[in-house]
Amino acid sequence: MKEFTIKENGFYGYEYQPDVNYFEHKAVIVLGGGGMPFSMTIDIAKYFQNTGILSIALGYFNVEGTSKYILETPVEYVERAVSYLKEKDYKVIVYGISKGAEYALVAASLIKDIDSVIVSSAPSKVCMGVGKNLMWMDQSSWSYKGKPLPYAYTKASLLSVLHNSLKNRELTFRDVYKRAFTFSNDDCDIKIENINGSILFLSSKIDSMWDSYDCCEEMMERLKENHFRYPYKHIYYEHVSHVVFPIYFSLSKIYRSERVYKKECDQMRMDLDCILKKWLRDC
């Protein structure tokens, strides 16, 4: 395991080499979610390692050398990790989940050396920043070359979030993001049409955090309108949680679908294991 630091490498993370490499000259950069501890990003990176591909778990907030919060987080963290892999002649795939999915799409829209993107539960817009206690700030989540990116924003009260979460019996920010997206302009759209490689969208039709299904459908339509020249695909599930990934996390229990539709969630994880391996082979 190789460690990277902001001071020495310009990004923070760990590299995981597979025992047997089934995907030579390919590597995955993993970006975890905004509400996830970095240990979960490492677990995802180890999943890819066990699949037989080199992976890097990249920490972009609340790790050494970074901000505690997701406020104008530099896209350059990903850019430097991509440069490190390209120097070794790797084809670079970026995987992101939730807030990390947003970061992955934003990064791929700006960094031409990213060859493929896989995102679980992605929004279609650059979102407002996330501050203390996971509260939203009137500030962009991301910056590039020292400038904040345009972002969707709305005011939100913790009380209304708690009320909706109790009412729905699961953690939900869906209404907050729906309001933010509705009143945003096109400048806030993630410029997915500028991505220089294939894109795999994964979503749930009952995502409680934001409406990732509709967001992914919107992005698919935009790619079609722009005659996007690389493969792109949207795979979605009717009754699974926000955590659309092949491994189970104990944190997933906060989502009602993991309790009510346990069988469907388990089936999704088995399906996705095969789907991701095929995508990694073909991309």
Image: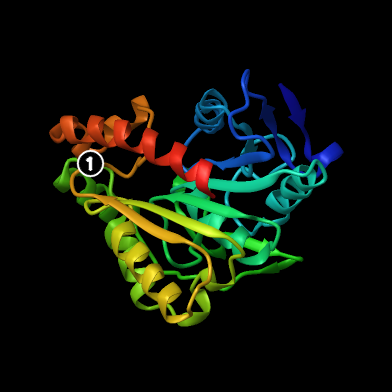
Say whether residue 244 is left or right of residue 276.
left
**Label 1: which residue?**
170
Residue found 50% across the figure and 31% down from its top:
44
- Looking at the picture, the colour scheme in use is rainbow
Q: Examine the image and state in which quarter residue 57 appears.
A: top right
Is 18 placed above or below 81 here?
Answer: above
In this orientation, which residue lies closer to the viewer: 201 or 163? 201
Residue found 52% across the figure and 58% down from its top:
198
Q: Position of residue 67 (x, y in %)?
A: 66, 46
Is 265 placed above or below 210 here?
Answer: above
Residue found 71% across the figure and 34% down from its top:
64
Residue found 66% across the figure and 63% down from its top:
143
Q: Position of residue 86 (x, y in %)?
A: 77, 47
Is 187 placed above or below 126 here?
Answer: below
Mark 1: which amino acid? Answer: Glu
Say whether residue 66 is left or right of residue 168.
right
| Quadrant (top left/top right/bottom left/bottom right) for the N terminus | top right
Secondary element under disc 1, as helix, strand or loop, is loop
Q: Position of residue 180 (x, y in %)?
A: 38, 69
Q: Examine the image and state in which quarter residue 210 appears.
A: bottom left
In this orientation, which residue lies closer to the viewer: 7 or 69? 7
Q: Position of residue 194 (x, y in %)?
A: 59, 71
**Number of marks in the image?**
1
Label 1 crowding class (10 Å Cα cut-off): few <14, some 14-19, many 20+?
A: some
Say whether residue 267 is left or right of residue 217.
left
Q: Examine the image and state in which quarter residue 278 appears.
A: top left
